[in-house]
Amino acid sequence: MNILLAMIPAFFWGTTYAVTQFTLTDWPPLLLGALRALPAGLILLAIKPTLPKKDQWPVIFSLGLINIATFFSLIFVMALTLPSAISGVGMISVPVFAIVFHWIVKKQRPHLIQAISGVGLIVLAWMLFDPSQISLNPVGLIAMFSAIMCIIIGSSITKALGNRMHWWTVLTWQLILGGVILTVATTIHAAINFQPYIDVLTGFDSKNLFGLLWIIGLNTALGYGMYVWLLQRMSVVDFTFGGIANPIAGITSGLILLGESFTPFQHSLMAGMIILSLLPQAIMAIRQQKTKLVVE
């Protein structure tokens, strides 16, 4: 049951790219990041008021800068420059980059199945992103790879916190601080190049409002709130199974909202990447279950 619930936030996160392109076209990424982060953080703070301790502010600020300010900006650059399906599927290559990062930085050698799945993901991604088969914006690709590194570095910092801070406090205040950073950056950008912001204000309509409500309310406040709530009730490995809804939502929403179309071969490559991304966690879960049965 929890795994089915884990699919809900993953689904909303997967729709970010298509919803942004469909409802918030040409909006500045910095503005979108600020509007996504700060209101959601304030909503979570209102639901459950928390306050970090004095010595916890530096690490919360770092998480807000990496996990929220930088990551959200990059996500919206992707959303405005890459096909929705490609963004959703591309982000599931995070495990490959995480394996390489931990191998190089922390000297943690990957398990055999992780290495095999990683190589498989690289091969399929190379075929899917082949310039001769599909035209992709290089700015969007750079943003995607940078966003992946934000996830890896931010997750490492979060994990290092251990049980020193409550998850709700970490989540709420990194959203608020990240939102504040993005608000300052947006203000500076608007002072330098105000025309995009004038266009946003003068052209604001009901479609824009729907997009903002979806991204702030469902995608961020509800999505991240469920994420925190579920992590207290299930393992990280189990939660990752719900992640399959992310690329599926990206592909489906791109098809419905934007009319994105791909060849059967390209869809098969996407399906292969999704399966390979889940394979290590599936095998680990099966092994853990067998070990638990033997012990009992």
Image (cartoon, helix red, strand yellow):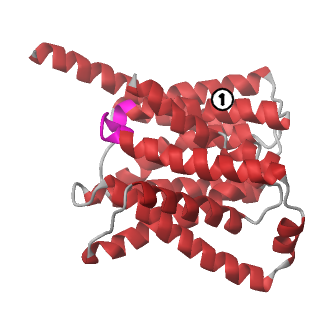
Q: Residue 172: which quarter of the image?
A: bottom left
Confirm whether residue 258 shows in the render: yes
Q: Which residues are magenta?
A: 230-238
Q: Position of residue 10 (x, y in %)?
A: 54, 37
Q: Is residue 178 left or right of residue 290?
A: right
Q: Position of residue 216 (x, y in %)?
A: 61, 53
Q: Residue at x 39, y 27 (%)?
A: 2
Q: Is residue 204 left or right of residue 159?
A: right
Confirm whether residue 133 shows in the render: no
Q: Position of residue 21 (x, y in %)?
A: 79, 49
- What SS does tag 1 mark? helix
Q: Is residue 9 magenta?
A: no
Q: Residue 33: which quarter of the image?
A: bottom right
Q: Position of residue 4 (x, y in %)?
A: 46, 25
Q: Amino acid at mark 1?
A: Met
Residue beneath disc 1: 270
Give the number of marks: 1
| Quarter of the image that includes the N terminus | top left
Q: Residue 274: which quarter of the image?
A: top right
Nearest to the observer: residue 220 or residue 133: 220
